[in-house]
Image: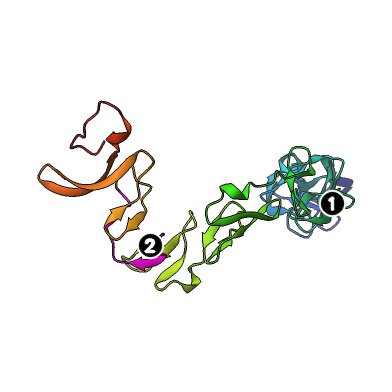
Amino acid sequence: MSNSNGITNSTTNATCNCLSGTSWDYYLQQCSLDCHSKESPNSNGSRYEFNSCHCNNGSVWNYSLRACVVNCSQITFSVSTLNITACNCSTGFNWDNITTLCKINCTGKKKSNEKNLNSSYCQCNNGYSWNSTTLICDEMATINCSMIPHSNGSNIDPITCFCNTGYFWSKLGTACFVDCTNITNATGNDKNGNCNCAGNLTYLSKQRICTTAVDCSKVPNSPGTNLDTGTCDCYDGYIFSNRTIKNKTVGVCHRECTRYPKTINRTDPN
């Protein structure tokens, strides 16, 4: 009898003495695994068959170990199963029992502070960024601050620009954002670095104020921002004016026809 010591239970004479970690199953008439948490950690407490258990998410049944083990095939940088609760990791990675992940070993990583940003990234020194393919800190290209709006054109370091008064370098490291903290009715920055305004107010970038103004958000050929209260900013090659289209006067960004020889203005927005 599988999972039995081969001796009939002297009390009942109808069951077998089962090995440790198993118990008699009257329905199957054999010794089956105990799948409760004490005997089978990471099991949900129910049997899959007499010799295996249903496992919790993130674990799979291992017939050799007779247990629910970490599903190492789903763990990045894992190469095989070490034991019930851990995986063998790729070279340069160590098993982390807290996160149950293969964690990169940042000790000795050049151009890093030897600390982990997360399980697969090391924190790099200023001027360097983590390369997730080569697993090293690569030197970052120096930003040309002369091309960054609202910067005075100079670098604090290779990846940071000096911003003009009233602006600050964004955490994304890509632009000088408006400092909205001192602008009345501003509620913070939008994704482009301008200010969001309370209620139906509109932000005017040149005046750096929140005020009542024409809504430019749906004007074709405009980035959706305002030049002033009654004028929208237009993409290069377009100018703003009010035009009557189908008996309705609307503000549009139309082509700046003076740029094109032998052309005349049309009345549609294009």
Nearest to the observer: residue 257 or residue 24 = 257
Percent position of residue 265, x then y: 21, 34
- Residue lying at the far left in this picture: please name it: 247
Q: Amino acid at mark 1?
A: Cys
Is residue 191 on the magenta stretch?
no
Name the secondary structure under disc 2. strand
Determine whether 212 is above or below 42 in the image: below
Nearest to the observer: residue 244 or residue 23 = 244
The magenta segment is: 206-218
Name the secondary structure under disc 1. loop
Does the CB distance between marks 2 and 1 fall below 8 Å? no
Image quarter (top left, top right, bottom left or bottom right) of the C terminus: top left
Question: What residue is drawn where x is 37% and y is 67%?
Answer: 210
Image quarter (top left, top right, bottom left or bottom right) of the N terminus: top right
Q: In this rendering, would 241 be left or right of 205?
A: left
Q: Amino acid at mark 2?
A: Tyr
Q: Which residue position holds label 1?
A: 106
Percent position of residue 13, x then y: 82, 52
Q: Main secondary structure of the magenta part?
A: loop
Q: In this rendering, would 165 be left or right of 30?
A: left
